[in-house]
Every structure is written in structure tokens, then in C-alpha cells.
Image (tube, grey):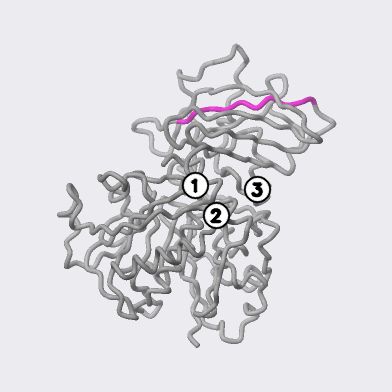
């Protein structure tokens, strides 16, 4: 039986601008509530962020909360940020800041104060509640203070939850780009779409998959001439945008807010079948708001491997899990070992070892994945940029201890070792997907 690495990858970092936010004080910084402003610490870049309903420990976020981290927020959603009470310190005030890019200053952002929040003490936890009043998905900065100084106490067991009122139903738009062949098992795009719809409905229990549409990039009403039908499209080669973002938000009623799954000939990196942002948070038009899958995979030898419809479909199912906030059940080194490049050329690690597990109690964890050295970060890809990461394919899985991993049959396990495993999501994974879907405008 064929043994393959799961060549699906995901982008671990959704960082504001090119992987790191460098703060710039600006005249727009004002007091909105007659309360002294304690801005994020401008002497340090903000690199850590937290997604709504992410159950991983996020210890780095907790440690840096007082001086500034990023919160991913969505319009009209209600949020709670909470952590354990430090009984040795007064209750800290949480301040939130709207961010915006500064024209002509790449990598730098300005910020304006949104509000100041005093906590409610629930049990032994500080709880800060607020509603996002933005008109689109945004990044907010934090500060945490006492008497105008950064909170010196301990922030432990941080949680960031969000609830929304948007529909828990989803429409998919499968966008075929360039020359697309039949799959290894002989299915054309329309037949592939039918199989994809069946699999999504079977795997994504708890949400409604309305339907799947098929559109062809060369038929796009305004962009079609950029995507010739007879040219194989290689993501990241034929254009710098791996995500082919301009095809999202297809300009047609019923498709503008669909989940865009972009089918290309292949990915311009070795051993990648597909990719997505972790908690992309965008349904419709938007940068990097798509799931991208290939009908072929480029092997390390340089050869192309043509994929079956099942491999392509399950790549889409897996990557869509990342899109809605699911982490790998067992973290790889690629997930954790990340480096940020600063303007002065220096680098530092932003990996958070506390997130080696996804934080869900019904998804087992396999320490072998990390200890084995699978998916080491490639030397030429050791800087967090505005592109994607990939997982390198091991060639020794046949007798590997990977077979003893308890999360082997979970869709978000990072390695595929059997073609016929009936993989699935857990109840908590589906609860997280549903909560993400209901806070994303669509």
C-alpha cells in the first residue's frame, strides 16, 4: 500500500504586515474614554497573536499581553478575554487599539485607542468582555496596566473566545485555474466537485454545506485573460500570490461570500498538495482568503506525481480545517520553529512550544511527530515572510512509529500513512469550526 506524507501545509502565523508589526506613534492616538492611554510598548515589535476560540495554551501571548499582542476580531462578534487572577496584584485594566497601515512605511502600523476595560472576576479569573464594531476582520493590539504602568503580574491560562450570529451554513466555490487534467482515477473537474461536496458533507458534521459551484478562472468576467485555459498554473510560480487572491469573492450573486477553493496544476514548492492560512477569517474577496490545492504534487526529485480525486478532496478537507482555525493535532517542528526577520536584518524566534498540542481534550497527541524530527524547517525557508510554509516529506514511514500515534485517524493529523483510513473530525473540532463560521461575515 502506498505510504505518503501529508503534503498539506498551513500557515501558522497571521501577523499584521510581513510577519511582524513595528509600532509607530501617531497623532491619531487619542483617549476615547477620558482614561489615560497606555499604548503598546513601541520599543518592541508585536509578533504574537491569538485567534478566537483557539484552545492551544498560547503561553507566549499570555506572557506578552501587557506590552502588546494581536487579537483577531470580526465585525459584530462578541468576545471575552480572560486569564487567572494574580492575587498579589491589583486588577489590571485592558486597553484595546485599532491598527492601520502607515502609507509609505512598510512593516509599520499606527494605532488608535478603541476602549479601556475593567475586568469582572468570575471564579478565579479576570474576564474582559467587548463587542467588535469594525466593518471587516481586523487586528487589534492590547496593553494591560495598573496605574499607568504595564501590569507586572502573572498572566496565566489565557483564553480568547468569540461568538457571532452569522449563519452556520457554507457555500463552496471550486475555482479551476489554467489547464486542468482529469485526476489519476479519471475524474474531471465537475466530477471532482461532486465528490468534494459528498466528502465535505460527510466530514463537516454540525455545519451545513449548501452546495458547491464550479467556476473557471479563464471565464472570470474581468480577470479571465490573465488565466489562459491551456496553460498549467503553478501557484507561487505563475504569480507571486500563492493564494491567487484576486479570484476570491467571485463577482456573482451567491458566490461573493463563498469559501474559495482554488484548484491549480501544482504548487511551486516540493511536496505540497495544498495550503491555507490558519484561521483565515475571510469568506469572499480578500488577500490570502482561499484554500489552494494542486492536482499534481512536485516531488523532491523534481518529478510530478499525479493525484487521485480522493487525495485532492481530502487535501481540501484538511486545509479547510486550518482555514476555520484547526491546528494539527500533533505539532510538527515546522509548526513551531519560526523566525521573524526585522528591518535591521536581525532575527528572533516566535515559536511557542506551549502550542505543541491543539488544546482540545478529545484529540489525542503524538509526541513522536515532534521528537522524530519530521518536517524540519528548511534552511532556505527559516524566515517568516508573507508566503507559506510547507512540510517536508519523510521517506522512511514504512516501519515508522508513526503507526502507533493515537491521532492517526484524525483529519488534522499532519501525516498520511494509509490511503484507506476513514479519517474524521472530533466533536470539539467541529464545535470550533462552527464557532469560527458564525463569527465570520458571510
**Circle 3/circle 1 CB separation < 8 Å:** no
Q: Which residue is mark 1?
A: 168
- First in residue order: circle 3 vs circle 1: 3
**Circle 2/circle 3 CB separation < 8 Å:** no
Q: Is residue 48 visible?
A: no
The Cα–Cα distance between marks 3 and 1, rounded to whole angstroms, is 27 Å
The Cα–Cα distance between marks 2 and 3, rounded to whole angstroms, is 27 Å
Q: Nearer the viewer, residue 357 or 79?
A: 79
Residue 263 drawn at (x, y percent): 32, 63
Q: Nearer the viewer, residue 260 or 212?
A: 212
Q: Which residue is mark 3?
A: 58
Q: Is residue 421 visible?
A: yes
Image point 32% across, 76% down: which residue? 183
For the residue labelled by badge 3, is the local secondary structure a helix, a strand or a loop?
loop
Badge 3 crowding class, 10 Å Cα cut-off, few under 14, some 14 to 19, many 20 or more, is many
In the image, residue 345 above or below residue 214 = above
Most common secondary structure along the magenta stretch: strand
For the residue labelled by badge 2, is the local secondary structure a helix, a strand or a loop?
loop
Quadrant location of the C terminus? top left
Q: Which residues are magenta?
A: 90-99
Q: Which residue is mark 2?
A: 206
Q: Is residue 118 magenta?
A: no
In the image, residue 205 above or below residue 194 = above
Q: Is residue 132 left or right of residue 257?
A: right
- First in residue order: circle 1 vs circle 2: 1
In the image, residue 353 above or below residue 231 = above
- First in residue order: circle 2 vs circle 3: 3
Image point 22% across, 64% down: which residue? 178
Amino acid at each position: 500500500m502506498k505510504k505518503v506524507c501529508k503534503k498539506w501545509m498551513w500557515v501558522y502565523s497571521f501577523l499584521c504586515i510581513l510577519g511582524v508589526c513595528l509600532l509607530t506613534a501617531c497623532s491619531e492616538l487619542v483617549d476615547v474614554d477620558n482614561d489615560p492611554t497606555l499604548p503598546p510598548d513601541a520599543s518592541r515589535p508585536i509578533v504574537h497573536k491569538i485567534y478566537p476560540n483557539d484552545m492551544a495554551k498560547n503561553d507566549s501571548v499570555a506572557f506578552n499581553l501587557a506590552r502588546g499582542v494581536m487579537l483577531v476580531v470580526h465585525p459584530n462578534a462578541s468576545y471575552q478575554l480572560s486569564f487567572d487572577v494574580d492575587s498579589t496584584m491589583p486588577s489590571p485594566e485592558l486597553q484595546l487599539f485599532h491598527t492601520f497601515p502607515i502609507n509609505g512605511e512598510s512593516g509599520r502600523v499606527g494605532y488608535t485607542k478603541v476602549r479601556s476595560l475593567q475586568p469582572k472576576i468570575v471564579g478565579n479569573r479576570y474576564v474582559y468582555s467587548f463587542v467588535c464594531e469594525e466593518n471587516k476582520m481586523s487586528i487589534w493590539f492590547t496593553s494591560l496596566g495598573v496605574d499607568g504602568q504595564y501590569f507586572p503580574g502573572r498572566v496565566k491560562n489565557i483564553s480568547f473566545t468569540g461568538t457571532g450570529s452569522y449563519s452556520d451554513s457554507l457555500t463552496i466555490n471550486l475555482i479551476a485555474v489554467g489547464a486542468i487534467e482529469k485526476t489519476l482515477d479519471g475524474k474531471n473537474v465537475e466530477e471532482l466537485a461532486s465528490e468534494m461536496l459528498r466528502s465535505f458533507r460527510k466530514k463537516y458534521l454540525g455545519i451545513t454545506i449548501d452546495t458547491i459551484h464550479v467556476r473557471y478562472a479563464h471565464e472570470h468576467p474581468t480577470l479571465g485573460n490573465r488565466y489562459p485555459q491551456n496553460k498549467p498554473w503553478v501557484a507561487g510560480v505563475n504569480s507571486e500570490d500563492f493564494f491567487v487572491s484576486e479570484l476570491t469573492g467571485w463577482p456573482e450573486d451567491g458566490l461573493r461570500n463563498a469559501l474559495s477553493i482554488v484548484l491549480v496544476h501544482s504548487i511551486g514548492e516540493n511536496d505540497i498538495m495544498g495550503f491555507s492560512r490558519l484561521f483565515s477569517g475571510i469568506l469572499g474577496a480578500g488577500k490570502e482568503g482561499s484554500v489552494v490545492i494542486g492536482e499534481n504534487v512536485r516531488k523532491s526529485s523534481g518529478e510530478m506525481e499525479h493525484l487521485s480525486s480522493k487525495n485532492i478532496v481530502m487535501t481540501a478537507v484538511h486545509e479547510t480545517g486550518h482555514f476555520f482555525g484547526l491546528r494539527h493535532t500533533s505539532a510538527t517542528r515546522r509548526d513551531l520553529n519560526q523566525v521573524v526577520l526585522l528591518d535591521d536584518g536581525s532575527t528572533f524566534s516566535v515559536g511557542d512550544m506551549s502550542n505543541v498540542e491543539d488544546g482540545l481534550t478529545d484529540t489525542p497527541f503524538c509526541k513522536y511527530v515532534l521528537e522524530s524530527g519530521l518536517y524540519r524547517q528548511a534552511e532556505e525557508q527559516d524566515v517568516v515572510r508573507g508566503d507559506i510554509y510547507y512540510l517536508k516529506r519523510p521517506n522512511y514511514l514504512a516501519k515508522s512509529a508513526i503507526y502507533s500515534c493515537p491521532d492517526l485517524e484524525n483529519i488534522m493529523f499532519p501525516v498520511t500513512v494509509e490511503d484507506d483510513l476513514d479519517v474524521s473530525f472530533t466533536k470539539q473540532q467541529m464545535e470550533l469550526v462552527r464557532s469560527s463560521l458564525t463569527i465570520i461575515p458571510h
